[in-house]
C-alpha cells in the first residue's frame, strides 16, 4: 500500500512538471500508462538535456545515463573491435575491460597487440602490466615494466611508475618500494600515489606518518576545485576512511 501511494505521488509530481514546463501532453499519458519506463524516458529525453546546460546538470545527466546503461563504453568498444580487428580497436576494448575489472580479457587483448611491429610499444606494455597486476601477478607486472623501461628509456608515465611501486610493494621488496613511493609522493599529480604510500607506511610500522598523509589527502581535497574532488572522489573517501 505504501509503495502504491508513493508511486502515485511520484507520477503526480511528473504530471505537474510536464504541465508547468509546457511539455507535450503526450508525456502525461506515457507517464500514467507506463509509470517506470515513462518516467525514465521523460527524465532522459526531456529533463536531462535541459540540465545539461550547467556543470551540475551535465554531471547528473552522465550519472543517470551510466546507471541506465553501465556497460555502454565496453559494448561500443566491443562492437568496433568486432567490426574491425585493428590494434587501435583492440587497445580501446582492452582499456574498457580494465575499467570494468575484466583483467583476464584485457590481458589477452594486450598480448595480441604486442605481437608484431608494436611489440615494444610502451602504452601496450603498460596496459599488459596493469592487467597482470589486476590478476595478482605482481612479479609478471614488474617484469613487463622493467622490459618497458629497458626498451623505451624515454617513456615517462606517472601511473606506470605508481604501478611499479605497487608491484614492488606486493612482492615485499620493502626498501625498493619505499624509494619509489617517496619519489612518486614528491611529483605525482593527484592523491593516488600519496594514498598508496600511506597504506605502505601503515603496513610497515610507520603509522603516524601514514595518518599524516591520509589527513593531508583529505584536507588538500577541500581546497581543490570541484572537478578535482569529483575526479578523485574514490581515493579521497578511502583516505578519509583510514583516519582514526
Image (tube, helix red, strand yellow):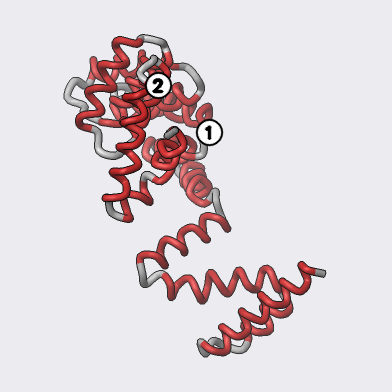
- For residue 118, say whether it is visible: no
Q: For the N terminus, which image quadrant?
A: bottom right
Label 2, label 1: how many angstroms apart (C-alpha)? 29 Å
Q: Height in image: 89 above or below 160? A: below
Q: Residue at x 40, y 69 (%)?
A: 52
Image location (x, y in percent) of residue 38 = 65, 73
Nearest to N terminus: mark 2 or mark 1: 1
Q: Mark 2 points at which residue?
A: 202
Q: Which mark is residue 102?
A: 1
Tell me if 119 is positioned left or right of 108 in this view.
left
Image location (x, y in percent) of residue 229 = 35, 49
Outermost residue to the right? 1
Q: For the C terminus, which image quadrant?
A: top left
Q: Residue at x 35, y 65 (%)?
A: 55
| Corner quadrant of residue 170 | top left
- For residue 221, say whether it is visible: yes
Q: Residue at x 53, y 27 (%)?
A: 104
Amino acid at each position: 500500500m505504501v509503495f502504491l501511494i508513493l508511486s502515485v505521488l511520484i507520477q503526480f509530481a511528473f504530471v505537474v512538471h510536464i504541465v508547468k514546463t509546457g511539455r507535450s501532453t503526450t508525456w502525461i499519458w506515457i507517464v500514467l500508462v507506463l509509470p517506470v519506463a515513462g518516467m525514465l524516458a521523460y527524465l532522459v529525453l526531456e529533463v536531462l538535456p535541459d540540465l545539461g546546460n550547467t556543470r551540475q546538470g551535465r554531471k547528473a545527466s552522465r550519472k543517470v545515463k551510466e546507471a541506465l546503461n553501465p556497460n555502454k563504453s565496453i559494448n561500443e568498444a566491443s562492437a568496433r573491435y568486432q567490426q574491425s580487428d585493428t590494434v587501435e580497436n583492440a587497445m580501446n576494448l582492452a582499456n574498457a575491460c580494465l575499467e570494468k575489472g575484466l583483467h583476464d580479457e584485457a590481458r589477452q587483448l594486450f598480448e595480441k597487440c604486442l605481437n608484431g611491429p608494436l611489440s615494444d610499444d610502451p602504452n601496450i606494455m603498460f596496459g599488459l602490466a596493469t592487467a597482470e597486476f589486476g590478476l595478482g601477478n605482481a612479479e609478471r607486472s614488474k617484469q613487463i615494466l622493467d622490459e618497458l623501461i629497458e626498451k623505451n628509456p624515454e617513456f615517462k608515465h606517472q601511473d606506470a611508475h605508481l604501478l611499479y611501486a605497487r608491484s614492488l610493494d606486493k612482492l615485499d621488496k620493502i626498501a625498493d618500494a619505499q624509494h619509489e613511493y617517496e619519489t612518486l609522493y614528491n611529483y605525482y599529480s593527484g592523491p593516488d600515489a600519496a594514498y598508496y604510500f600511506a597504506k605502505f607506511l601503515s603496513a610497515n610500522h610507520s603509522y603516524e606518518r601514514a595518518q599524516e598523509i591520509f589527513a593531508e589527502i583529505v584536507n588538500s581535497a577541500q581546497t581543490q576545485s570541484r572537478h578535482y574532488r569529483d575526479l578523485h572522489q574514490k581515493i579521497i573517501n578511502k583516505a578519509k576512511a583510514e583516519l582514526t
